[in-house]
Amino acid sequence: MIRIFKTNYTKDKIDFRMEAAMNELSLPTDKMREGGIIPKIGAHEHFDVYQEDPAINSLEELAAKKIGKESSLFVASGTMGNLIAVLTHCIRGDEVILEAGAHMLYYEVGGMSALGGVLPRTIVGNRGIITPKQIE
């Protein structure tokens, strides 16, 4: 689910914060649709294979606009998004450098290794942060 929150009100604009939530199937609430931010769900409520769902299209357009990109891709979960990112940048046999306590390492059940043949390489950071010098 993606939650969209109004975070800043000014005379000329309203800023929104988008947050990916847990990997559960959830539909937008009526409150989320009140301001026209998310249109009514189309015929393809959960999976928009043919890009026909106006709600999904609207979310993708909003996300692209907010980050200054031409387009964006709505994915069903943060796990899926992380896996797509890894597979976009790596090929089988590559390594991904992760901080030793990284979410991807402990909570995403090895998808990068199982599906992409990409291996995690951990570095112990300071409160979750690693430095370029540690990577060298």
Image (cartoon, grey):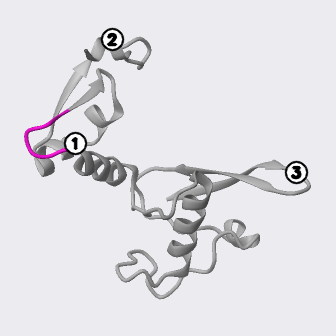
Along the line of sight, which residue is nearer the eye, 108 or 65?
65
Q: Is mark 2 on a helix, strand or loop?
A: helix
Residue 4: x and y in percent read 63, 56
Distance between the alpha carbons at the discs numbered 1 and 3: 43 Å
Write the residue at 58% across / 54% down: 68
* Residue type of the residue flagged with mark 1: Val
Residue at 63% across, 71% down: 38
Q: On screen, 2 above or below 34?
A: above
* Label of residue 133 in the image: 2
Q: What residue type is labelled 2?
A: Lys
Residue 124, given in percent of the width and then of the height, sits at 30, 13
Q: Mark 3 or mark 1, which is nearer the start of the sequence?
A: 3
Highlighted magenta segment, given as a residue range: 90-95
| Front: mark 3 or 2 | 2
Q: Quick check: is 50 in the magenta stretch?
A: no
Instruction: Say which label, 1 or 2, has the lower sequence index.
Output: 1
Q: In this view, does 50 lie to the left or right of 41?
A: left
Q: In this view, does 82 lie to the left or right of 34?
A: left
Disc 3 to disc 2: CB gap under 8 Å: no
Q: Name the residue under label 1.
A: 109
The residue shown at (41%, 11%) is 126
- The answer to which of marks 3 and 2 sits earlier in the sequence is 3
Where residue 10 is drawn, which disc sits there?
3
Q: Quadrant of residue 28?
A: bottom right
Residue 127's x, y, as percent?
44, 15
93 magenta-colored:
yes
Contact between labelled residues 2 and 1, with CB atoms less than 8 Å apart? no
Task: Sort mark 3 into few (<14), some (14-19) or many (20+) by Cα contacts within 10 Å.
Answer: few
Residue 60 falls left or right of residue 51: right
Q: How far apart are marks 1 and 2 (CA)?
A: 29 Å
The residue under label 3 is which amino acid type?
A: Thr
